[in-house]
């Protein structure tokens, strides 16, 4: 993707629509111009191989609800010889799904024979993924039951993983478990992705779901599927949610000693767990362990620990965290740093307070937030 079109995309889509003003209409014209430019770029076979160019353009158009423009761009691709390549067609199907345009995704899948494009489990899996991305969860099961039978396509582990993910997202956990049994009956081995989907969903649930997650963990060992850091992180989160603190501590120590190596999320789970327990001493311990084991604290780390340290009147620790957040360019909210500065003033630490606010103002600000959102 050329630097010109990349910069043009960023320039246009970083602007926010403000209603039916002349400026908004100008942006509308800009978008239409961009679509025309993109279609012209598509004449290049080299450009058509650039997945990122397509993804950026389609996703940005979807954010401003320009669905007709998305269809214009993707439908335009049918005139090129690439459309006879199943990989290329599958890319377009997925892009429709990411834009919540599932009707267009399934239409393209149905048209593939007329476009001299073969249909196999590859494009079928793209259609399933588009269905899930479009949040059309009620249609996923129907697709899995009907299309393989009609088209003589054998679902593979990717097909079943997509289905399991869909069931977990809508909370039909029993259906997800039943599908795991079906996988084995069909002679397909569940893989790491299968178990990670199940572990992430069940460890986030109540005590009963935690128990089932532990069953999956044991089954994982039986099947000789080696857990990765995401697997362990799901288990750590489940343990801390269920107040199985000592088990979580042992699990993370096993990671440190035997692998896989813990990451930021691993330590943030431990820190957040002890913050919820009101245990500042242990939270500080895991913060120190995080750094000593080569993990850089992130915004979640600081946004979790600074208000906890401040509320427990450990102002020196809160101050150090604020400084570290600036150095790491993970600056927390202005209001939070102001609270720490005010506390320093109350302790006659005026110079420290001034230094902190000066650093804050020189580095910019990030919004508040302290929830864990990533599992790997």
Image (cartoon, grey):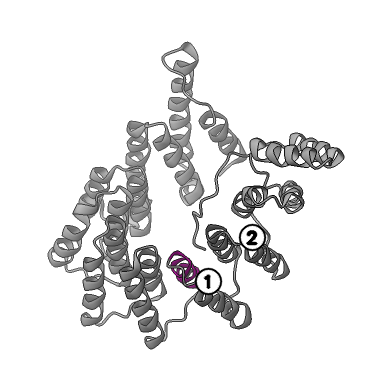
Q: Which label number is shown at residue 280? A: 2
Q: Position of residue 56 (x, y in %)?
A: 48, 43
Task: Report the front residue among 204 and 307.
Answer: 307
The image's mark for residue 229 is 1
Judge whether 91 appears above or below 165 on screen. Answer: above
Whole-Å distance between the Cαs marked 2 and 1? Answer: 26 Å
The reply, left or right, for residue 217 in relation to residue 247 is left
Residue reaching furthest to the top: 22
Give the image location of residue 25, x and y in percent.
44, 16
Callout 2–callout 1 Cβ contact below 8 Å: no
Question: Residue 260, position in %: x, y?
Answer: 57, 76
Measuring 56% from the left and 63% from the top, which residue is drawn there?
274
Q: Position of residue 106 (x, y in %)?
A: 23, 49
Which residues make up the magenta segment?
A: 231-241
Q: Residue at x 24, y 61 (%)?
A: 172
Front-most of 177 and 268? 268
**Would residue 50 be visible to someone looking at this image?**
no
| Front disc: 2 or 1 | 2
Q: Is residue 195 visible?
A: yes
Asked if residue 330 is among those painted magenta in the image, a careful observer would answer no
Name the foreground residue: 293 vs 165. Answer: 293
Secondary structure found at label 2: helix
112 relative to 45 in the view: left or right = left
């Amino acid at each position: 993707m050329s630097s010109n079109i990349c910069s043009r995309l960023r320039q246009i889509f970083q602007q926010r629509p403000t209603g039916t003003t002349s400026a908004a209409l100008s942006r509308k014209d800009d978008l239409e111009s961009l679509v025309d430019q993109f279609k012209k770029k598509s004449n290049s076979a080299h450009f058509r191989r650039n997945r990122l160019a397509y993804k950026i353009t389609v996703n940005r158009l979807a954010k401003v609800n320009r669905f007709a423009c998305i269809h214009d761009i993707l439908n335009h691709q049918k005139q090129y010889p690439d459309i006879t390549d199943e990989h290329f067609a599958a890319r377009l199907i997925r892009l429709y799904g990411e834009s919540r345009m599932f009707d267009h995704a399934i239409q393209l899948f149905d048209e593939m024979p007329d476009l001299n494009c073969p249909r196999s489990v590859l494009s079928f899996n793209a259609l399933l993924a588009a269905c899930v991305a479009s949040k059309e969860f009620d249609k996923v099961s129907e697709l899995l039951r009907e299309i393989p039978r009609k088209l003589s396509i054998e679902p593979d582990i990717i097909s079943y993983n997509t289905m399991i993910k869909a069931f977990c997202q809508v909370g039909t956990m029993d259906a997800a478990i039943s599908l795991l049994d079906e996988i084995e009956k069909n002679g397909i081995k569940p893989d790491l992705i299968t178990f990670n989907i199940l572990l992430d969903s069940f460890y986030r649930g109540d005590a009963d779901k935690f128990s089932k997650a532990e069953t999956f963990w044991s089954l994982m060992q039986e099947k000789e599927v080696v857990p990765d850091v995401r697997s362990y992180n799901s288990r750590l989160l489940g343990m801390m949610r269920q107040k199985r603190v000592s088990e979580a501590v042992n699990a993370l120590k096993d990671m440190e000693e035997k692998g896989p190596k813990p990451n930021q999320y691993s330590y943030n789970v431990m820190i957040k767990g002890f913050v919820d327990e009101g245990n500042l001493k242990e939270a500080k311990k895991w913060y120190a362990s995080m750094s000593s084991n080569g993990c850089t604290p992130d915004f979640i780390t600081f946004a979790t620990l600074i208000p906890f340290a401040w509320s427990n009147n450990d102002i020196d620790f809160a101050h150090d965290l604020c400084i570290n957040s600036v150095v790491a360019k993970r600056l927390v909210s202005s209001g939070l740093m102001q609270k720490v500065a005010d506390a320093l003033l109350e302790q006659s630490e005026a110079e420290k307070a001034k230094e902190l606010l000066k650093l804050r103002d020189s580095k910019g600000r990030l919004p508040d937030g302290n929830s864990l959102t990533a599992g790997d």
